[in-house]
């Protein structure tokens, strides 16, 4: 699957279950662990778990390898690793505290409506 299609698949999965403030950050020039990172907010722990379950389900149904899922026990921050794309699903408090957008260069982030 093309990287653009992978990104769109993940974003569509998040949007279907009403994830908030979805952004995508291009990491190609600043990191080797992934090409892109998606960050999305959940309204509750249950919402975060549902979002991660949907993304993983949609990835697997499209035969995309999911390397790992971390954080489903606490649901404050769930990370889904699918090789060149990493998806972070966070509650608002955790997202504000870690501020990944600033850490990884928010000026290069694109809002979901622009993807």
Image (cartoon, rainbow, N blue to C red):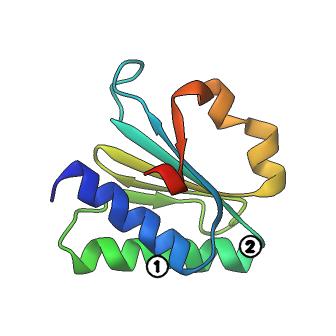
Residue at 64%, 25% in the rendered image: 103
Measured along the vertical axis of the image, is residue 56 above or below residue 77?
below
Query: In the structure shown, which secondary structural element does the residue marked by tag 2 occupy?
Result: helix
How many residues crowd around disc 2 within 10 Å: few (fewer than 14), some, or many (20 or more)? some
Q: Is residue 58 left or right of residue 97?
A: left
Q: Circle 2 is placed at which residue position?
A: 45
Q: Is residue 104 visible?
A: no
- Mark 2 or 1: in front is 1
Left/right placement of residue 59 relative to residue 78 reads left
Residue that protrudes farthest toward the front in the picture: 114
Mark 2 or mark 1, earlier in chain: 2
Q: Position of residue 70 (x, y in %)?
A: 52, 58
- Residue sitting nearer the eye, 29 or 46: 29
| Whole-percent x, y for residue 29 in the image | 36, 19
Quarter occupied by the N terminus? bottom left
Check disc 1 and report its element: helix, strand or loop: helix
Q: Which residue is mark 1?
A: 54
Residue at 39 percent of width and 40 percent of height: 36
Question: Which residue is found at the position 35% from the left and 47% from the top?
Answer: 85
Q: Alpha carbon of mark 2 to alpha carbon of mark 1: how far?
A: 14 Å
Residue 4 relative to residue 95: left or right? left
């Amino acid at each position: 699957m093309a990287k653009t299609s992978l990104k769109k698949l993940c974003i569509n999965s998040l949007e279907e279950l009403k994830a908030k403030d979805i952004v995508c950050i291009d990491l190609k020039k600043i990191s080797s662990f992934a090409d892109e990172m998606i960050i999305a907010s959940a309204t509750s722990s249950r919402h975060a778990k549902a979002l991660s379950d949907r993304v993983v389900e949609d990835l697997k149904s499209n035969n995309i390898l999911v390397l790992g899922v971390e954080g489903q026990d606490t649901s404050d921050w769930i990370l889904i690793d699918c090789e060149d794309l990493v998806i972070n699903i966070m509650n608002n408090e955790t997202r504000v505290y870690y501020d990944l957008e600033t850490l990884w260069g928010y000026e290069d982030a694109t809002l979901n409506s622009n993807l």
